[in-house]
């Protein structure tokens, strides 16, 4: 996948561009419907299928008090998902006050200096200073400049439109089945393995401590998980989401014990799929009591993973 971070860099690509525009937090089924229009256009007419998105999430710059505390994906995770959808070009524009103040007409003018043949958006997408740009404005621009506009209606689930907000709430509630249905794939979290207190290895259960930045996590507790390693292989495991109260922890984190795995994962990225919720996080009277419970959790996880 090609990555270009500035609108000024697109003209040099020298090929027709078919672009889906939006924030695309989660790349859920509604987002996928928009992206599919760009991918189909590139396949049909030639050129590159691309996604133009924004990082960080625009609301964190425009109205930080209203911004969600967690997002569904990091930019890297988003790129992985889009790659599987056939996206060949990713344009993650850095969203700052300068971009927030840009008028919609100026934004489109800058974009159209490249050979843009298709623009696909959700039919209610708004952009530009004070959200002045919309589908009507894009229709007028398409008539002037000759690109094809694809305005895509929302995708529904259980009678309501799919949205990143709904999916985040489903994950917070532990309703991962509903989240998966709206995402169109299993819900996963990616994170970089960082050094922790290394207590797990002293009691026979080494853990990978994942730095998940601000990714939305399921409810705290112990989960059966499946981890995708950097080489693409998958390993079952047991994860704890919480503060680790037995050892005096205070910061919520994600730690994963990979079953029957040996190797150095520091600095590597793991993708974690949550399969089954086992129990709430608890404070144990001693490290030995914690060790005994982890062994029970591990035994239970092995039985569950046999059927997965």
Image (cartoon, rainbow, N blue to C red):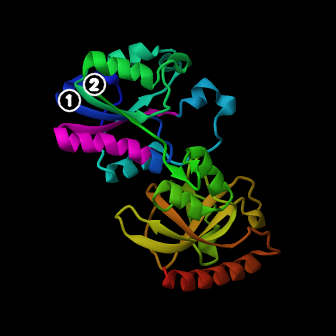
Q: Which of the pair 203/218 is nearer the observer?
A: 218
Q: Where residue 64 sits in the image (x, y, percent)?
A: 65, 29
Residue that appears at 35% across and 30% down: 5
Q: Which of the pair 72/153 is nearer the observer?
A: 153
Residue that appears at 46% across and 32% down: 54
Q: Which mark is residue 1?
A: none
Q: Where residue 236 sits in the image (x, y, percent)?
A: 49, 75
Mark 2 surroundings: few (<14), some (14-19) or many (≥20) residues within 10 A: some
Q: Residue 268 occupies which quadrant of the picture?
A: bottom left
Residue at the farthest front position: 159
In the picture of the structure, the residue carrying the numbered disc 1 is 13
Q: Residue 265 occupies which quadrant of the picture?
A: bottom left
Alpha carbons under labels 2 and 1: distance apart? 7 Å
Q: Where residue 206 sits in the image (x, y, percent)?
A: 57, 71
Q: Where residue 38 sits in the image (x, y, percent)?
A: 30, 39
In the picture of the structure, the residue carrying the numbered disc 2 is 9
Whether the magenta-drawn stretch holds residue 219 is answered as no
Q: Which residues are magenta?
A: 31-56
Q: Quadrant of the N terminus?
A: top left
* Mark 1 residue element: helix
Q: Is residue 14 visible?
A: yes
Q: Is residue 276 above or below residue 121?
A: below
- Circles 2, 1 touching at the beta carbon (< 8 Å): yes
Whether the magenta-drawn stretch holds residue 40 is answered as yes
Mark 1 surroundings: few (<14), some (14-19) or many (≥20) residues within 10 A: few
């Amino acid at each position: 996948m090609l990555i270009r971070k500035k609108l000024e860099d697109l003209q040099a690509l020298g090929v027709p561009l078919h672009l889906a525009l939006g924030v695309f937090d989660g790349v859920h089924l509604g987002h996928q419907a928009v992206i599919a229009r760009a991918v189909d256009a590139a396949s049909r007419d030639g050129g590159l299928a691309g996604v133009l998105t924004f990082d960080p999430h625009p609301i964190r710059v425009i109205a930080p008090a209203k911004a969600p505390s967690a997002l569904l994906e990091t930019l890297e995770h988003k790129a992985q998902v889009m790659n599987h959808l056939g996206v060949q070009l990713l344009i993650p524009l850095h969203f700052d006050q300068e971009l927030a103040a840009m008028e919609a007409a100026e934004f489109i003018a800058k974009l159209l200096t490249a050979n843009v043949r298709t623009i696909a958006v959700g039919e209610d997408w708004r952009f530009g200073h004070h959200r002045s740009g919309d589908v009507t404005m894009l229709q007028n621009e398409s008539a002037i400049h000759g690109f094809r506009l694809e305005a895509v209606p929302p995708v529904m689930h259980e009678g309501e439109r799919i949205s990143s907000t709904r999916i985040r709430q489903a994950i917070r509630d532990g309703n991962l089945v509903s989240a998966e249905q709206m995402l169109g794939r299993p819900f996963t979290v990616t994170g970089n393995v960082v050094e922790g207190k290394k207590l797990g290895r002293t009691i026979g259960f080494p853990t990978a401590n994942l730095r998940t930045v601000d990714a939305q996590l399921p409810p705290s507790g112990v989960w059966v998980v499946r981890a995708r390693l950097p080489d693409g292989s998958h390993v079952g495991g047991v994860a704890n989401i919480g503060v680790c109260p037995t050892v005096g922890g205070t910061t919520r984190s994600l730690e994963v014990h990979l079953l029957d795995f040996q190797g150095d994962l520091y600095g590597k990225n793991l993708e974690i799929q949550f399969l089954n919720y086992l129990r709430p996080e608890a404070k144990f009277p001693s490290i030995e009591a914690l060790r005994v419970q982890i062994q029970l959790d591990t035994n239970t996880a092995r039985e569950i993973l046999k059927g997965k």
